[in-house]
Amino acid sequence: MPHTSSQKFSWIIGIVAPFYYFILMETLAALWTGYDSIIQHMSELGGVESPYMTIMNVAGFMGVGILILIFSYGFFTVEFTKNTWYKLATVFLWIAGIFMVIVGFFPCDAGCIDVTTTGQLHSLTSIPQSIALPLAIVFAAFGHQMETVWNKSWFGISLVLGFGSLLMGPLMSSGQYDAYVGLLQRIGIGFCLLWIGFYSVRQLKSKNP
């Protein structure tokens, strides 16, 4: 059966999400004199030292979390009943969206070095989405492999973007790439939002879910 209007809306949101998030984030980064997107965490834009703390936390983190949840509604309505991999992908999309909203309530401390309870809660609530979102994409890859409507290229694209995003975490934790932590963070979430955009374009172009 054809896409419903609510499904089409979720795909449009999926296409808008990467542009919205990165345009907002990098606009704030450019406006904040001295901020370096390559070296500094994304969270510093919403941290206690940032002149744009409220904008980044509400419109940025919470905003993109809501967009992910709207996208996940469309994904749920189309894919959830098809196979177990898609069920897992749906649940992990929900987790990612919910925690992206939650993290906006807890600005990081100066330099994103945990000192206060709020800063610690920021670090704690920023972990689930950084793992859940790329895992959702990996699960979706295996879901695609089981469905004949998806060609093999979608399996490969999803695996590369999902595992590529996951890889950014160990690279940042290694300490060897501290001078590029901001860039690695942006690549990590960028891969995930890129997949959401690709998937949404594919669904909008298809006549049936």
Image: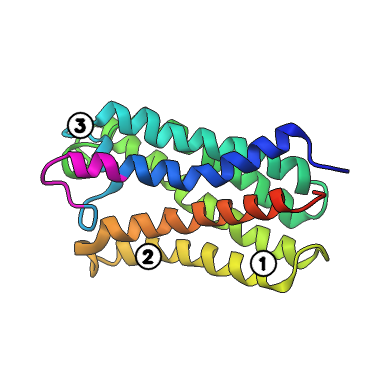
> What residue is shown at x 79% (from left), y 65% (from top)?
146
Q: Is residue 29 within the magenta segment?
A: yes
Write down the region rendered in magenta: 26-36
> Could you say where residue 201 lies in the image, as x and y percent from the top left?
63, 52
Instruction: Of the two numbered discs 3 and 2 on the same chain, state the one appearing first in sequence.
Output: 3
Residue contact between numbered discs 1 and 2, judged by CB atoms under 8 Å: no
Q: Distance between the residues labelled 1 and 2?
A: 25 Å
Q: Mark 2 points at which residue?
A: 170
> Which residue does the numbered mark 1 point to in the structure image?
154
Q: What element carries label 1?
A: helix
Taking the image as shown, residue 71 lies to the left or right of residue 103, namely right
Q: Which residue is drawn at 11% across and 46% down?
A: 34
- Asked if residue 166 is positioned above or below residue 209 in the image, the reply reads below
Q: What residue type is labelled 1?
A: Trp
Q: Can residue 104 be seen here?
A: no
Q: Which quadrant, please, contains the N terminus?
A: top right
